[in-house]
Amino acid sequence: MAKLQSTEVETKLSQTKRQFMEVWPILKGQLVDLLKAHRMPDEVTTWFSENLSYNIVHGKLNRGLAVVETLEILHNRALTPDELFKGCVLGWCVEILQVNVSLAKDMMANSFRVPSAKQTGTNDGFMLEAALYHLLKLYFRTEPCYVYLLELFLGTTFQTATGQMIDILTFTKGEINLDKLSLERYQQVTIYKTAYHSFYLPVALAMRYAGIYTDSAYATALSILIPMGVYFQVQTDYLDTPRQTESVDADQKCSWDITIALRHANEEQRKALEEHYGHKEAASEAQVNQIFNDLQIDGLYKEYEQTTYEHLSNLINVIPEVSQNCKEGIVYEDRVTLKKRVFSSLLDRIYQRQ
């Protein structure tokens, strides 16, 4: 795949992020004004404003930026001011959804940075979700793609919640059952919990807003972006392990490392994993890490990464860049096509990340 020079990519990303950030104060102001219009008490308006400021803008914003970048690639030209602004609105809606997902995870895990969040966190999530759909209605209800955009957000929310439920039920509180940690279950968790909302949703939103209607285009996107999302989560699991971070991580979770280890472990190693995996003691963590080293998990990861990169590259290279903008037999004059660079740019960004 042809690649842009890294400095060119970084410059473009910096410009896109600056434009993206410039839109947020406008959207935040409109959301706060909505509460004021309903004559909410000042303390409620202030709380919601702080909720938006504290939770939304401090992440990497990769999901939201992907909407804008995809939209520009699809049009193969600089976006008009209206296209850029609305692309940013969609991107911020994705970021709001992501924060809502993270907030729900923190609530379920009793993980709070601010003690008062235990009382308010659930309702904060409801308000963020409502904010997403308010922005969507405000800017897109007169657009032909409005219902499609709604369906994407609603469907993705359901998929993500389903993935979260699978993950929760893998480990009931106080119980560690490694029989549940199959690679098949891990992939299902990852697809539903991560891949749909982190990879497919941003691209599909841009495709809908750009005017791509044919089902085959979305099937192609899904066939690439879902395994790409799985690859991203495998990376995250691998890079977050104590072997990489040099910290003790006693989380009881369905991660790539443990599922691969269980696939390759002999009977003695499996018994040791059953005894020590997920325990907080440093000795247990050291025992688990030793088994991972003995099973050469690092080498298996590198092999997986290279094989996956080549597989995804092959899928991208065979994308037919022909007109996709048709609906009910009508071909629109302003044709928008599915571009290989939509996917190659995402893949290049995550390949061998540290």
Image (cartoon, rainbow, N blue to C red):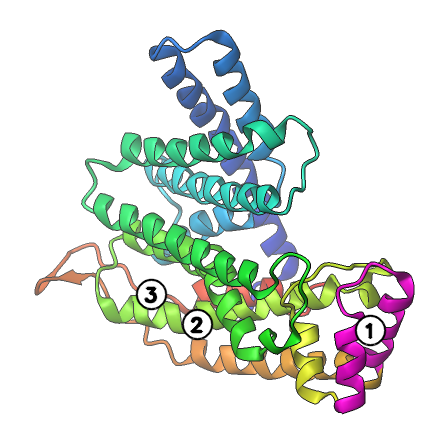
Which residue occupies 74% across, 61% down? 240
Instruction: Report how far apart the C-alphas of labels 2 and 3 lie in the structure.
Output: 13 Å
Quarter-of-image position of residue 235: bottom right
Q: Which residue is mark 1?
A: 288
Asked if residue 139 shows in the view, the reply is yes
Q: Quadrant of the C terminus?
A: bottom right
Relative to 200, say whether 25 is above or below.
above
Q: Furthest residue to the front?
A: 174
Query: Hey, what amino acid is under mark 3?
Result: Leu
Q: Which residue is mark 3?
A: 338
Sequence-first tag of 1 and 3 = 1
Relative to 292, say whether 171 is above or below.
above
Asked if residue 206 shows in the view, the reply is no
Span colored in magenta: 266-293
Quarter-of-image position of residue 170: bottom right
Q: Which residue is mark 2?
A: 224
| Local SS, label 1 | helix
Residue 150, x across and y down, in percent: 28, 45
Q: Main secondary structure of the magenta part?
A: helix
Q: Answer whether residue 273 is magenta in the image.
A: yes
Q: Is residue 163 left or right of residue 330?
A: right
Residue sitting nearer the eye, 168 or 43: 168
Query: Hey, what amino acid is under mark 1?
Result: Val
Residue sitting nearer the eye, 347 or 305: 305
